[in-house]
Image (tube, rainbow, N blue to C red):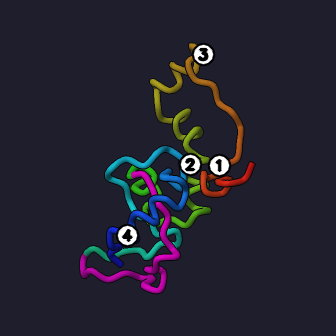
Amino acid sequence: MKLNKQQREQLKQKYGGRCAYCGNLLPDRWHADHVEPIVRNWTNGTCERPENNRIDNFNPSCSSCNIVKNSLSLEGFRQLIGGFIKSLNRDSTQYKFAKRYGLVSEVPTEVTFFFETYGNP
């Protein structure tokens, strides 16, 4: 579903002009993410879940969140982000070094998306 200008502007303002996931202000070029993925088949132009291609299934997203989320469900995306610390500790020498020198500190917390708390004091 291609959104028109009015639909894109309404979607952008859904969470005050912020990414539904990380909460950063949306830049000029932002993505309309399918909350429940449609799973595109790039070889033939179809999608596995066309019923999810509807306006009420979109969230405004910065490009980095949308690219990392890809075709994951919200819970899959949450689990992926939650595993970043483990993979950084396993795979990134720079991360381990920065941690050793106190430049990075890990905080055990659940991943909460911006839209889950938006408008709640």
What percent of the width, then of the height, locates residue 44?
25, 81
SS assignment at label 3: loop
Is the residue under label 2 in contact with that under label 4 (CB below 8 Å)?
Answer: no
Q: CA distance from mark 4 to mark 3?
A: 47 Å
Horizontal side of 14 relative to 1 (left or right) equals: right
Mark 2 or mark 3: whose residue is earlier in sequence: 2
Q: CA distance from mark 4 to mark 2?
A: 32 Å
Mark 2 or mark 1: whose residue is earlier in sequence: 2
Residue annotated with mark 2: 81
Residue 115 in which image quadrant: bottom right
What percent of the width, then of the height, locates residue 47?
37, 81
Mark 4 or mark 2: whose residue is earlier in sequence: 4
Mark 1 or mark 4: whose residue is earlier in sequence: 4
Is the residue under label 1 in contact with that under label 2 (CB below 8 Å)?
Answer: yes
Name the amino acid type tagged 1. Answer: Val
Q: Which mark is residue 6?
A: 4
Q: CA distance from mark 2 to mark 1?
A: 7 Å
Please name which of the two marks, 2 or 1, marks the residue nearer to the observer: 1
Q: Residues within 10 Å of mark 1 (few under 14, many from 20)?
A: some
What percent of the width, then of the height, locates residue 21?
54, 53
Name the amino acid type tagged 2. Answer: Ile
**Span of residues in magenta:** 43-62
Residue annotated with mark 3: 102
Instruction: Point out the residue furthest to the bottom here.
Output: 51
Residue annotated with mark 1: 111
SS assignment at label 4: helix
Horizontal side of 89 relative to 61 (left or right) equals: right
Residue 61 in which image quadrant: bottom left
Name which residue lies at 66% across and 57% down.
Answer: 116
Please name which of the two marks, 3 or 1, marks the residue nearer to the observer: 1
Name the amino acid type tagged 3. Answer: Gly
